[in-house]
Image: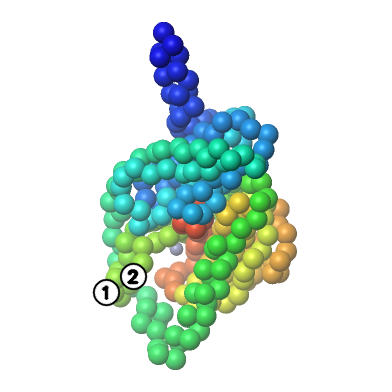
Amino acid sequence: MRVTIQFLLIWALVLPASELIAGPRQSLVPGGIALIELDRSDKTPHFYFKGKPVLVATLDDKFVAIVGLPLNLKPGEYHISGHWGNEKALQKKFFSVVGKEYTTQYINIEDDRKVNPYASDMARIWAEQKRQRKAKSHYSDTPVDVNFIQPTQGILTGSFGRRRIFNGEARRPHSGMDIAADQGVPVLSPADGKVVELGDFFFSGNLVYVHHGQGVTSLFAHMSEINVELGQAVKKGQLIGKVGATGRVTGPHLHWSLGLNGAWIDPALFLP
Ligand SMILES: [Zn+2]
């Protein structure tokens, strides 16, 4: 009898959080998210995936770790580990990831320099990549309201994760969501946050990075204009910029990337 009770107790603690009603939807594939219910505690959670702190949010009155799964993650067994507050006891929570075949997209870019940059473009591109890595890895303990809104009105193209061939050349997979909209349509912050990077970048055009807290970061790219300043605090629904066609594009649209613990994940998982 005692054995049965212990078994039930352990099972209850690792019950998957996939049946939650509110908030992000679990998708245990590369480019998806794992939702892992944590024990209740009044202390600050410190949980990590591959050495990076993960988001812990309150969903349906439960503490849930929301773990970003990188697009290059191999299928298999993984875990997060961590502890509460200053407690020494380390907890491990396990989950499995299955493979996903993303389709291939062939894109023709009129300005071939955006696909095969000149040697003289490379110093700029490297400097911008360094700034983007820094912006993406920004971290603060600020709690995150994970009930995001769609940042611009338009057609969701569902192209996250697609392998891409630009003008016949293989390039990195598509790490965000493209929303097709007319030039000048407002781009709104999907959640509260702080502007941690902005500028006119070679590939991304006019871009803005907003850090929402706990390693959750949005990137908005290809805008026609930017309506925020570096370091500015923004509220959910606040104007960030306008839809445009700057950088490496075929036409006006908003590119929105959403990063969790350093991994770009499908932003659609965070929308109602
Ligand atoms: Zn895009």
Question: From where the camera sits, is residue 9 visible?
Answer: yes
Residue 87 location (% of width, % of height): 62, 39
Q: Nearer the viewer, residue 28 or 83?
A: 83
Q: Is residue 78 left or right of residue 192?
A: left
Q: Residue at left 42%, top 43%?
A: 79
Depth check, mark 2 against mark 1: the one in front is 2
Q: Secondary structure at mark 1?
A: loop
Q: Residue at left 55%, top 37%?
A: 89
Q: How is the image coloured?
A: rainbow
Q: Residue at left 45%, top 42%?
A: 34
Quick check: 264 above or below 19?
Answer: below
> Is disc 2 in contact with disc 1, using a CB cutoff of under 8 Å?
no
Residue 226 location (% of width, % of height): 64, 69
Residue 95 location (% of width, % of height): 39, 39
Q: Secondary structure at mark 2?
A: strand
Circle 1 Cα neighbour tier, 10 Å, few/some/many (<14 / 14–19 / ≥20): few
Locate residue 229: give its quadrant. bottom right
Question: From where the camera sits, is residue 185 visible?
Answer: no
Q: Nearer the viewer, residue 40 or 172?
A: 40
Residue at label 2? 171
Q: Is residue 209 left or right of residue 97?
A: right
Instruction: In the displayed orientation, state which residue is furthest to the bottom.
Output: 120
The amino acid marked with disc number 1 is Gly
Distance from Cα at disc 2 to Cα at disc 1: 9 Å
Residue 168 numbered tag:
1
Residue 185 location (% of width, % of height): 59, 61
